[in-house]
Image (cartoon, rainbow, N blue to C red):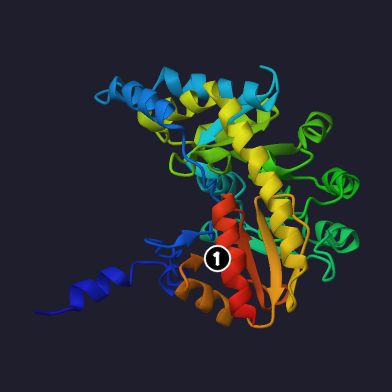
């Protein structure tokens, strides 16, 4: 059998795609999973049953229609904005990031973001053959380097700027005044990625109201529905409408939309879970601070970034003990020997701290 047809077919794939690597998800069966910033809590049993009955009644033989539009408005109301704000939905934030890249993909256009940051900003920009400019954060505290950001904006005139609020993986809630000056200096879109908003002490909705080039992107993944894949984008209707034009018409399944609407009807349950995780975050941070050989940074997300003496060895040792965290040390030079730890349940955090103590000693 000849392989020539396969070789010829592969040759049609863009060279940069062939040279890229797929996103790797770590196997997690049988371990305590603290690597992906998920909400560790499930719904109470009675709500699981109610949700199951509701999903069982969904018309799976029909394409998504009115319920998707209802979900979009329900999410806008949940965010506390009125009907004068545009909203569109994505299959998670990742799809919205991809649609934003498509929207600005003109020859010579640039996407700009602080680094280290969410890897999909660059990955999806490059898929559209956009230039990506990463501006390093300050090395000591992972705050925005305002002078460097403003200089990069002036030099590159980016069509799109991402500002994660708080940031991933550093969990930093950057200075709001600095962010506003960056937004005012930008001629293009400024997307405030508020994926971790349930755990943060501030948001950027007021900035969005003042600065019409600012969009706010949120997700239900950290809310507690990572498996449902619902992201949403808020902003001036004139801007959001352009992204809506690119959205696949049936990108949100009827099951996902119904599950999300059910969750919003029980938002108090998820709010209580977020409050518990914020308390556990402070407990975890205090305990990590007291450990020799580890330096944690304050967090406004549901994860903590910490520097250890050997990130690879610490990751491997914890995994061998049944605890999965994220080794982020290869993401950027500023993250040398850093690991990212998702905040878990009280029992999971107790287990993590005990195993980490053993690893570090």
In the displayed structure, does residue 361 sit left or right of residue 124? right
- In the displayed structure, would residue 296 be above or below residue 244? below
Asked if one can make out residue 108 in the rendered structure from this viewpoint, the answer is no
The residue under the point 70% across, 28% down is 236
Looking at the picture, tell me which residue is in the foreground, 231 or 318. Answer: 318
Name the quadrant containing residue 325: bottom right
**Residue at the location (79% across, 45% down)?**
187
Query: Which residue sits at x=70%, y=23%?
Result: 80
Q: Position of residue 108 (x, y in %)?
A: 66, 59
The answer to whether residue 221 is seen in the rendering is yes
**How many labels, in total?**
1
Relative to 262, is 122 above or below?
below
On the image, the x and y values in percent for residue 103 come to 58, 44
Few, some or many residues within 10 Å of mark 1 (<14, 14–19, 20+): many
Q: Position of residue 141 (x, y in %)?
A: 83, 65
Residue 343: % across, % down: 61, 54
Q: Is residue 44 left or right of residue 279?
A: left
Residue 8 occupies quadrant:
bottom left
Nearest the camera: 204 or 41?
A: 41
Q: Which is nearer the eye, 258 or 156?
A: 258
Left or right: 250, with 350 as reference point: left
Residue at the spot 57% in from the left edge and 21% down from the top edge:
74
Q: Nearer the viewer, residue 213 or 37?
A: 37
Q: Is residue 255 left or right of residue 145?
A: left
Q: Quadrant of the C terminus?
A: bottom right
Q: Quadrant of the N terminus?
A: bottom left
| Disc 1 element | loop
Judging by the rendered image, the residue that carries numbered circle 1 is: 325
């Amino acid at each position: 059998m000849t392989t020539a047809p396969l070789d010829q077919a592969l040759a049609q794939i863009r060279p940069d795609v062939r040279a890229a690597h797929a996103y790797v998800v770590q196997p997690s069966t049988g371990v305590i999973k603290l690597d992906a910033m998920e909400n560790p809590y499930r719904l109470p049993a009675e709500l699981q049953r109610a949700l199951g009955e509701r999903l069982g009644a969904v018309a799976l033989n029909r394409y998504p229609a009115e319920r998707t539009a209802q979900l979009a408005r329900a999410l806008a109301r949940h965010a506390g904005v009125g009907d004068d704000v545009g909203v569109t939905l994505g299959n998670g934030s990742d799809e919205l990031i991809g649609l934003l890249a498509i929207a600005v993909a003109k020859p010579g256009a640039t996407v700009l973001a602080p680094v280290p940051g969410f890897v999909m900003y660059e990955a999806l920009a490059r898929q559209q053959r956009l230039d990506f400019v990463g501006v390093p954060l300050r090395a000591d505290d992972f705050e925005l380097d305002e002078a460097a950001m403003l200089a990069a904006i002036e030099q590159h005139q980016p069509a799109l700027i991402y500002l994660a609020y708080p940031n991933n993986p550093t969990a930093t809630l950057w200075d709001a005044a600095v962010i506003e000056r960056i937004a005012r200096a930008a001629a293009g879109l400024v997307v405030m990625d508020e994926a971790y908003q349930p755990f943060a002490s501030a948001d950027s909705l007021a900035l969005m109201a003042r600065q019409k080039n600012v969009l706010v992107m949120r997700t239900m993944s950290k809310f507690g529905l990572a498996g449902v894949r619902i992201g949403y984008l808020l902003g001036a209707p004139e801007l959001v409408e352009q992204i809506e034009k690119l959205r696949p018409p049936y990108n949100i399944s009827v099951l996902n939309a119904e599950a999300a609407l059910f969750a919003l009807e029980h938002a108090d349950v998820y709010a209580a879970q977020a409050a518990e995780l914020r308390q556990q975050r402070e407990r975890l941070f205090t305990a990590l601070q007291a450990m020799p050989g580890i330096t944690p940074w304050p967090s406004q997300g549901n994860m903590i970034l910490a520097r250890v003496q050997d990130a690879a060895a610490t990751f491997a040792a914890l995994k061998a003990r049944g605890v999965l965290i994220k080794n982020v040390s290869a993401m950027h030079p500023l993250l040398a020997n850093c690991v990212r730890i998702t905040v878990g349940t009280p029992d999971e955090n107790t287990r993590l701290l005990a195993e980490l103590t053993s690893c570090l000693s």
